[in-house]
Image (cartoon, helix red, strand yellow):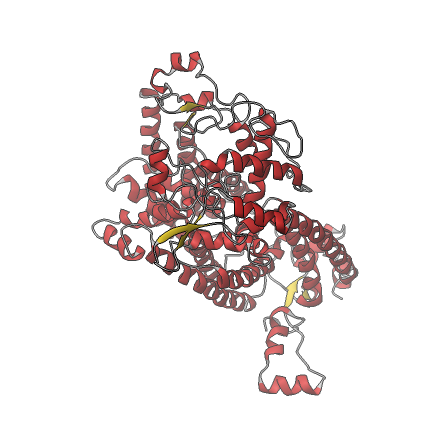
Amino acid sequence: MVRAISTLVGLAFVGVLALALFFTAKDAIQNPAPEAAEHEFHLHPRDAALSSAGYFGTFDRRQVQRGFQVYKEVCAACHSLKYVAFRDLKEIGYTEAEVKAIANQWVIEQPSINPDTGEATTRKNVASDHFPSPFANEVAARAANNNALPPDLSLMTKARHDGANYVFSLVGKGAYRPQPAELVEKFPGAKTPEGLHYNPYFANLNIAMPPPLTSDGQVTYTDGTAATHDQMAKDVAAFLTWTAEPKLESRHAAGFASVIFIAIFCFLAWGAYQNVWRDVKH
Amino acid sequence: MSFPWAKHYEPKQPLMRWLDEKLPVPRLVYNAVGAGYPVPRNLNYFWNFGVLAGAALGIQIITGIVLAMHYAANAGVAFGSVEGIMRDVNAGWFLRYAHANGASMFLLVVYIHIARGLYYGSYKAPREMVWLLGVVIFLLMMATAFMGYVLPWGQMSFWGAQVITGFFSAIPLVGETIRVWLLGGYAPDNAALNRFFSLHYLLPFVIAGVIILHIWALHIPGSNNPTGVDVKGEQDTVPFHPYYTAKDAVGLGVFMLLFALLLFFSPNLLGHPDNYIEANPLSTPAHIVPEWYFLPFYAILKSFTADFILPAKLWGVLAMFGSILLLFFLPWLDSSPVRSANYRPKYRGFLIVLLFDVILLGYVGGAEANARNVILGQIASGYYFAHFLIILPWVSRSERPRPLPGSITEAVLAKHGGTSPAQTALASN
């Protein structure tokens, strides 16, 4: 009885699946899926070879500071960094006084309320403030950017596959390039629309962001490093790796200690196991 | 407890004797996971996974309670509060990564625990109730894991909630009403987030309760073993403590090692990058995929693409829930009196195919839905249902099992190179 019922139920599911398979196969033969330009022309990110990568990765503080300088002078014009506070900069090697100065001199001010009139106003940033958004709200951001919204960068390197390398590749040398002729030839409908920019590292190949880094020496590094295009891209990727995962170093250190501790536990547990079971065949 | 030769709890200290008279909790522990529970002597490492699942639940509850002290279940601030935990709470990153990866570890050990049960026939008489309660725990875990994934309120949280609650709208006539009632709105929003948080906090304790029943039901017949042969006498068993506490400690160490590697060195390996983007109802991600542990079921859902009497979506939802609910009937679908697949050559073959089939379903569930993957998913889903509902009932009737060992002790001694009755007698101490 059980066998009969279960066989019937099983045959119902298998039958419907067979029917679905038949229609899927028929449809695949009759209307083969069109190839997409982003399948063929999308590129995997280049390796930025950051010191934070790998099991024992740590931040290169000078590089992260240079990356912060790139963010400050280039990216911050459009991109917010809302989960990071000025005080956090102490973690990448700035002193208390430097942090206060950076906050105080930050071009975009913090939204505030006039204590006398209650009217909306702005005030200078202090160390405990989070980085202010360059735009008052989403509508203002879109209005200033051809209806595109510059995303917040705090978590960017965790919000994309292979994020640090992605950021490096996306803004690095040669990423922005003319659309390949063979792409337009093969996919006439995939021509980069007016106002967008061709970039093979971007998921759908056409990005709204204009090229942020355009020439060597765009930023003058205070530590004297030659600001080549790729160097700036690499540094900003290092900075955004830190903003997305500020506790990376303590995580790696704690992991190293934990693994050693647990390995010793495993060794002792194995010894105890051998000892307890020594007279019992099993 | 289960066998007449089980050791009895005899407290020697006056304080313990006093406690035993008033509230015999030490006695309960002694009989449940102490020397008072006789266990077959031949259990292999697959029998570690019940204890590991218990440990994983403990880790989830402890990290979860602390996380809840810092998390804010409000659609406006939930995402930011999680970032606050990651950045400003002392060791918050550790708690959150432990909880997120702990869920994966929990599901991983539970899947191995279930596979162990399938292979060694642990679902069969007299352990049907143990199995049924286990399926209840699994269902509760899936609900808890799903609702927990919604809490960070990232893009995958939001769209996952949208897709999963959308299943209910497949129910004819009243589906949409039920969906809106469950969500407390037309789309996932603050009302949904709040109730998910409430239930996500509640269900782990329900799971803990059902685990107590699961262990209680197990202790009546006692544990199964790799031969599937019943315990015949005292020589077949060893006391749980110290024998299996020692063995479980080894397994727990390996579990913790793997967990630590994941947590400290690749905490985002199993997550989706889109969940680091705050939920946005106006922007649908390119590919909505659940966490890895739901992918096989997601693949089954997606495989039903043709209308036949019922709409395709309803077939998919029925099949997806059916694929788990059919486990409730497993003890009666399999009529073979032999438990262990080691002695059931045909069943063993089909079961190994099922294992690869589920892994294939997992791949398809996460892969792009092109024609090749959809067809692979349809074949794999077909085998899944055929295995449990057609192959298993018929194979269990027709196959001729290999000869079973006379007893657990005999099987152990045969493994060590001797089967004479004299040795069997010797091994009884």
Residue B357 visible, this angle: yes
Residue sitting at 56 percent across and 56 percent down?
A: B92
In the displayed structure, would residue B298 be above or below residue B335? above
Out of A274 and B64, give the one closest to the viewer.
B64
| Residue B114 place in picture, x, y as percent | 52, 52
Q: Please identify the quarter of the rendering in which residue A181 is found.
A: top left
Relative depth, front residue between A1 and A155: A155
The answer to whether residue B338 of the structure is visible from this angle is no
Q: Residue at x 45, y 55 (%)?
A: B148
Left or right: B291 as drawn, with respect to A148:
right
Image coordinates for residue B70, horizontal then vertical, percent: 50, 61
- Across and down, in percent, residue B267 comes to 58, 46
- Residue displayed at 65% across by 49% down: A95
Q: Residue furthest left?
A: B173
Image quadrant containing the C terminus of chain A: bottom right
Q: Is residue B361 above or below residue B144?
A: above
Count the labels in the image. Answer: 0
Q: Nearer the viewer, residue B293 or A174?
A: A174
Q: Is residue B26 toward the left or the right of residue B127 in the image?
A: right
